[in-house]
Amino acid sequence: MADETRRHSGPNPEDVPSGLDPYTEFDDFDLPSYVGRTSFHKLPELTDAAALAARRPDVAIVGAPFDDAVSHRPGARFGPRAIRAAHYDAGSPNSLQLGIQPFEWIDVVDAGDAPVTPANIERGHAVIRRKVLEVARAGAIPIVLGGDHSITFPSASAVAESIAPKRLGMVHFDAHADAANSTWGVLASHGTPMRRLIESGAIDGRNFVQVGLRGYWPPPEVLEWMRQHGLRTHFMTEIEERGAEAVVADAIAEALDGPELIYLSIDIDVLDPGMAPGTGTPEPGGMLSRELLRAIRQIVGAVELAGMDIVEVAPAYDVSDITAAVAHRCVMEAISALAAKRRAAGGTARPSGRSRDG
Ligand SMILES: [Mn+2]
């Protein structure tokens, strides 16, 4: 009778040859990335302001699944989920670039998504601004997953408000200046957020530094407005001639020429479309993935980071998830650099003791 029962009740732990208890050996954090919860790296999900304020994490991931302000191909509303899913590691990641397991040095949580609704730019920007402000007021550095680039206006505005009276500088990686006055009459599009940030006073034009611009936009009158407002622009041609590291060193100095803190905004289309095809306005001739990842380590290692976003990942145009993967690594390079700074400052590790591979 016992044998009869076993035959009909499915796999039995006694049949597992390893001798380990298959029901308790791995917790969700250590299970493969495609199993279990879908927060960033399976980190704790703290979606309400009170929980964030009580925990006061060092970093909080924020999703901004909004793409109603694009001028060309839509789809970046699906970026946050794709970026969260774009890794194959389990357990505590170990940065070979910086020699650190970042989650053992700093407290990183996933604050969830801003509750956007479709076809409503004003509401979308308002809830993104509120969400980022909640995170920043809880003492965490927001790392915002876009979404189209229009979300940088509410996001960086919230960060600037949270650090006042200190001032915010901007390092902005992009193929495009995103500093037009309007696109087809729309002031809040993804072609205009940088002008809105400067006009609103959130960031001074002279501390607004753009890296990687190329291609055939914007028109001369927009470049003239940028020049009049003191923006520092580093075209892709300058990176070709001087190398990314020298250009990024200048960008850091220019953004901090007055301000104490930095907002880092990364449009994934700063990368060459061969390395990041999954985006709405791909522009040939861009940076290499390795150059951008190194630049993020260089910047975050050198400045006081107040906030960051990574935008314009549109999974429908992606190939084998490579764009989502590099966006995910952009986030991880920043987190790892923050952890390395904590260690260098004499911080204390909180070893989780967890690892899937011994
Ligand atoms: Mn952009």
Image (cartoon, rainbow, N blue to C red):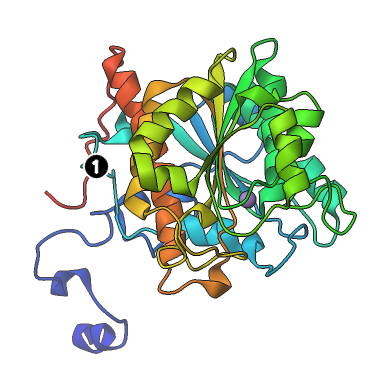
Q: Is residue 246 above or below residue 279?
A: above
Residue 191 point in image, percent of width and height: 73, 51
- How dense is the environment of label 1, judged by Cα within 10 Å: few (below 14), some, or many (20 and up)? some
Residue 168 point in image, percent of width and height: 62, 21
Q: Is residue 354 visible?
A: yes
The residue that disc 1 covers is 94
Residue 88 point in image, percent of width and height: 32, 60
Is the residue indicated by label 1 positioned so its CB lies within 8 Å of ligand 1? no
Horizontal side, residue 287 vs residue 125: left or right = left
Quadrant in the picture for residue 193: top right
Q: Is residue 296 above or below residue 316?
A: above
Residue 315 point in image, percent of width and height: 54, 68
In which quadrant of the rendered image does the N terminus lie? Answer: bottom left
Horizontal side, residue 304 vs residue 33: left or right = right
Quadrant in the picture for residue 169: top right
Quadrant in the picture for residue 8: bottom left
Horizontal side, residue 225 vs residue 17: left or right = right
Q: Residue furthest right?
A: 185
Q: Is residue 160 above or below residue 5?
A: above
What amino acid type should be assigned to the residue bearing mark 1? Answer: Asn
Report the residue at 37% width, 54% height from top.
288
Count of numbered marks: 1
Q: Name the residue nearer the viewer: 44 or 140.
A: 140
Q: Name the residue nearer the viewer: 338 or 22.
A: 338
Horizontal side, residue 125 vs residue 65: left or right = right
Report the residue at 34% width, 20% height from top.
342
